Image (spheres, grey):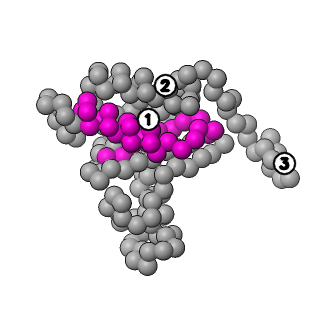
Amino acid sequence: MQFFGGSEISPSPPVPTASGNNAHMMYVFNRNGVCLLYKEWNRPLHTLNPQQDHKLMFGLLFSLKSLTAKMDPINADKGNLGVPQLPGQGCSFHSFRTNTYKLSFMETPSGIKIILVTHPKTGDLRESLKYIYGLYVEYVVKNPIYTPGSPIKSEMFNTALDQYVRSIS
């Protein structure tokens, strides 16, 4: 570990070699911050209980959305930091990368937030997130027994999601 003059601060995870090792976890939140779905594929370390983890992730998204809107160099109307932006309003972010993971984010016009955490060398996942949202619409929203705002328990959705996420490289 080097701090000054070196290029490595902390080790990066190994590059995934097998299908399915690229995605670590995924969250789906509704507009009110309720976690509708949480899935893990490759998360060896659990540091928080699930409720704390969900609150932390939603808080991170809320803060990043507010910060990017406030720093927008094009839009003169910055609004108040901390006030939620409507989907598609102002400047937004799609992903950020650290040395150990990449977080990709998409928000739909209805306020559904999809977050996929993957290996840091994973490419642009905007189209993948759109595809996952299509699965959500097809298997969850169109399901007549699904109650909006309740946790997602569709086996067909989970199966299709697992198959697709394991194919992401």
The numbered mark, 2 or 1, whose residue comes first in the sequence reads: 1
Q: Closer to the camera, 138 or 95? A: 138
The residue that disc 2 covers is 166
The kind of residue on which mark 1 rests is Met
The kind of residue on which mark 2 rests is Arg
Is 145 situated left or right of 74 in this image? left
Q: Quick check: marks 2 and 1 in contact, CB under 8 Å?
A: no
The kind of residue on which mark 3 rests is Gly
Magenta-colored stretch includes residue 61: no
Front: mark 2 or 1: 2
Q: Is residue 2 above or below residue 147?
A: below
Q: Which mark is residue 39?
A: none
| Quadrant assignment, res 141 | top left
Q: Which residues are magenta?
A: 112-140
Q: How far is disc 2 from disc 1 in space, using C-alphas?
A: 12 Å
The residue that disc 3 covers is 6
